[in-house]
Image (cartoon, coloured by chain):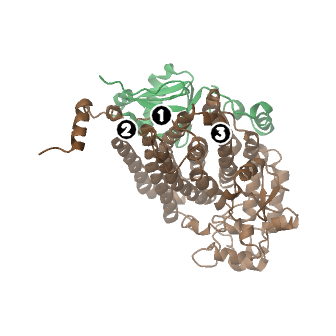
């Protein structure tokens, strides 16, 4: 079980009964609090299982030490601080077939944060795209 | 032969903006931008008090070809799974009977929401002036049509392949008598398509989709799997693969008005109204379906709510927008109280009103009562002992002559309907954030359960004129109303709804209800 603060059962979620209620109803928890986290839900499939196990928790694990991945029956639940990025050219190489960013979107079930595509990369970020940061278009020659 | 001026204009444009040599989707998307469609002076039938900016983006750079390809792959996977392996392993009969009943409600109600979202996003397409934003909304119109079909299909699949088809098929025929229908129409219909266009977007996309679809369409699949249902994850997780674009549409709606002066005046009120409108129904109904409509529990509903609604939506969406003046909804404190208690309050009423429903309900077992008390300290004293009394009086047995509704009358606990949300509440016996307030307008009394709805009503009372079941059927005997409202199975006399899911238990009929002599009364007349 992950001990990361991004884990599914971290913080208040580890508490039960009265201890949970005391923190849940505490005065300081009656307003929304800004966080820099992002959440990604990937529907389980042949391709997504490979992306999770071989890339996000494999070759690219060191790139994002805050990333937590949890198995929630039909889907993978991912949470990280800042952003999660998937380069679909790497997925193509792994799968041995053409796999575009739109193939990736077939099984992306939910995003909490600002998700966008650029070329063959899928990104979900805590940045306010379109407000703090301009959304880029594909650079053409 | 001379070419037409339109052909010449197109030829000239193409000579300046060369078509891309490759067919890379994002290159085509970039090329299409060079046509500089101008909707700046867009005229719309659906006005808004906000000025939507003209340069808002669509975050996924979708073109029609990639959209169609993507969606066809999703459908192939979904229908392939349902029609092949899930049918072969008889998956629909492996579902726990209690969860089978929950899916009658969840999928039928979601279908209504998806259907109304078609109209809502069509309206937003008409209102927006940024070409990419229009493109995002247009994709969503097509998604919502897909989702409406998916929800209809899953009920069809359950009805055809599974157990107890009544309620999966044609649930809508009970819409006049079922006390959950009208509240659902308030959030899923009125909230999405009535009034200011941007306010509708906040209801649908920023709150409904970015916040509540996560428990409603994602977390629900975990409960489904735990209770033997593999059809729902197959369909619902596929539905949700479109929702991320809808959440992005909602966010871009906010981006488009962020610098408009009207946002500083109205946005926080509109956000709070939308949050309260959506949570007032979703919070108790989803909690009730998950916890009381399952045998195997995943986690307490309040934890699911705390994660997806408070921490993630509140922190990652609303919290991050704080520097643009977006505030934490003023009603959050009451919403949190509801997330802890309101689904318990609602189940008490739903069980009492069971004959008017289209799904079977089950009293908590002793083992479940222990789970509730461990996770919601104080549950037994408020709810558990009431269920014990109802069970001891034979509430499941048609020969008992006892409907739990009588208990409320015997103990002087009148049930009211909140005029704005249409959610039933019992102010003298509840732990959620409900208190009775009554106002009179045009000679008619209106009950409210909270100050947030009351405030919305005060600003436009003519919007909330829907009759509730107590007003509509006052003085009428219950079995007559059930028969008239199509609450019976195909034999014409056995009720669709039942107070148990025991396959050996006796089923209640119209005659059993008639013997009790229960007559509708409007509690507001007694005040």
Q: Which mark is residue B331?
A: none
Same-chain status of marks 3 and 2: yes
Question: What number of labels is visible?
Answer: 3
* Residue B407 in the image, given as x and y percentages of width and height: 83, 66
* Secondary structure found at label 2: loop
Q: Looking at the figure, which quarter contains the C terminus of chain A?
A: top left
- Residue at numbered disc 1: B56
* Residue drawn at the location 73% of the way across and 39% of the way down: B330
- Residue at numbered disc 2: B37
Disc on the earlier residue, 2 or 1: 2
* Residue drawn at the location 69% of the way across and 73% of the way down: B506
- Residue at numbered disc 3: B266
* Residue drawn at the location 36% of the way across and 46% of the way down: B68
Q: Nearer the viewer, residue B406 or B116?
A: B116
Q: Nearer the viewer, residue B442 or A79?
A: B442
Disc on the earlier residue, 3 or 1: 1
């Amino acid at each position: 079980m992950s001990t990361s603060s991004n884990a599914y059962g971290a913080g208040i979620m580890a508490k039960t009964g009265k201890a949970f209620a005391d923190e849940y109803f505490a005065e300081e928890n009656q307003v929304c609090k800004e966080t820099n986290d992002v959440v990604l839900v990937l529907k389980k499939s042949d391709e997504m299982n490979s992306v999770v196990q071989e890339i996000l928790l494999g070759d690219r694990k060191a790139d994002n030490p805050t990333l937590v991945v949890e198995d929630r029956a039909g889907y993978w639940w991912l949470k990280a601080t800042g952003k999660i990025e998937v380069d679909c050219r790497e997925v193509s190489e792994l799968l041995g077939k053409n796999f575009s960013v739109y193939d990736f979107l077939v099984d992306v079930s939910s995003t909490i944060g600002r998700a966008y595509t650029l070329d063959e990369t899928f990104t979900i970020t805590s940045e306010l795209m379109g407000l703090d940061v301009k959304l880029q278009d594909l650079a053409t020659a | 032969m001379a070419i037409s001026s339109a052909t010449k204009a197109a030829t000239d444009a193409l000579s300046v903006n060369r078509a891309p040599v490759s067919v890379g989707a994002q290159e085509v998307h970039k090329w299409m931008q060079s046509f500089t469609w101008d909707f700046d002076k867009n005229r719309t039938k659906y006005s808004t008090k906000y000025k939507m900016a003209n340069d808002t983006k669509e975050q996924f750079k979708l073109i029609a070809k990639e959209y169609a390809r993507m969606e066809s792959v999703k459908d192939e996977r979904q229908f392939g799974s349902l029609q092949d392996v899930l049918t072969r392993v008889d998956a629909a009969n492996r579902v726990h009977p209690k969860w089978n009943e929950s899916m009658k409600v969840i999928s039928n109600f979601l279908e209504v929401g998806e259907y109304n979202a078609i109209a809502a996003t069509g309206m937003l397409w008409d209102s927006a002036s940024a070409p990419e934003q229009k493109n995002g909304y247009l994709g969503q119109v097509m998604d919502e049509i897909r989702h409406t079909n998916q929800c209809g299909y899953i009920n069809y699949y359950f009805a055809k392949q599974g157990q107890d088809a009544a309620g999966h098929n044609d649930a809508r025929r009970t819409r006049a008598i079922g006390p959950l229908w009208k509240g659902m129409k308030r959030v899923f219909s009125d909230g999405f398509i009535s009034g200011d266009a941007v306010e509708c977007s906040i209801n649908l996309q920023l709150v409904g989709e970015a916040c509540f679809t996560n428990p409603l369409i994602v977390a629900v699949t975990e409960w489904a799997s735990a209770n033997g249902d593999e059809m729902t994850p197959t369909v619902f997780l596929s539905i949700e693969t479109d929702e991320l674009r809808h959440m992005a549409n909602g966010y871009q709606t906010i981006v488009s008005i962020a610098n408009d002066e009207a946002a500083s005046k109205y946005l926080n009120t509109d956000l709070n109204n939308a949050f309260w409108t959506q949570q007032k129904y979703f919070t108790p109904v989803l909690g009730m379906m998950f916890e009381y409509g399952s045998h195997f529990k995943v986690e307490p509903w309040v934890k699911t709510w705390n994660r997806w609604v408070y921490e993630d939506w509140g922190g990652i969406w609303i919290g991050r927008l704080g520097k643009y003046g977006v505030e934490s909804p003023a009603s959050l404190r009451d919403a949190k109280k509801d997330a802890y208690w309101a689904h318990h309050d609602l189940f008490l009423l739903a069980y009492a009103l069971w004959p008017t429903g289209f799904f079977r309900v089950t009293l908590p077992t002793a083992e479940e009562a222990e789970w509730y008390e461990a996770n919601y300290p104080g549950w037994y004293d408020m709810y558990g002992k009431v269920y014990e009394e109802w069970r001891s009086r034979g509430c499941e047995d048609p020969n008992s002559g006892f409907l739990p509704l009588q208990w409320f009358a015997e103990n002087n606990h009148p049930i009211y309907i909140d005029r704005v949300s249409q959610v039933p509440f019992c102010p003298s016996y509840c732990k959620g954030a409900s208190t009775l307030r009554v106002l009179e307008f045009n000679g008619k009394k209106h009950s409210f359960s909270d100050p947030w709805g009351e405030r919305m009503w005060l600003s436009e009372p003519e919007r909330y004129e829907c009759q509730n079941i107590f007003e509509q059927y006052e003085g009428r005997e219950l079995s007559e109303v059930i028969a008239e409202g199509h609450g019976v199975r195909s034999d014409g006399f056995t009720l669709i709804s039942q107070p148990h899911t025991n396959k050996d238990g006796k089923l209640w009929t119209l005659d059993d209800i008639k013997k009790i002599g229960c007559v509708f009364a409007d509690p507001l007349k007694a005040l």
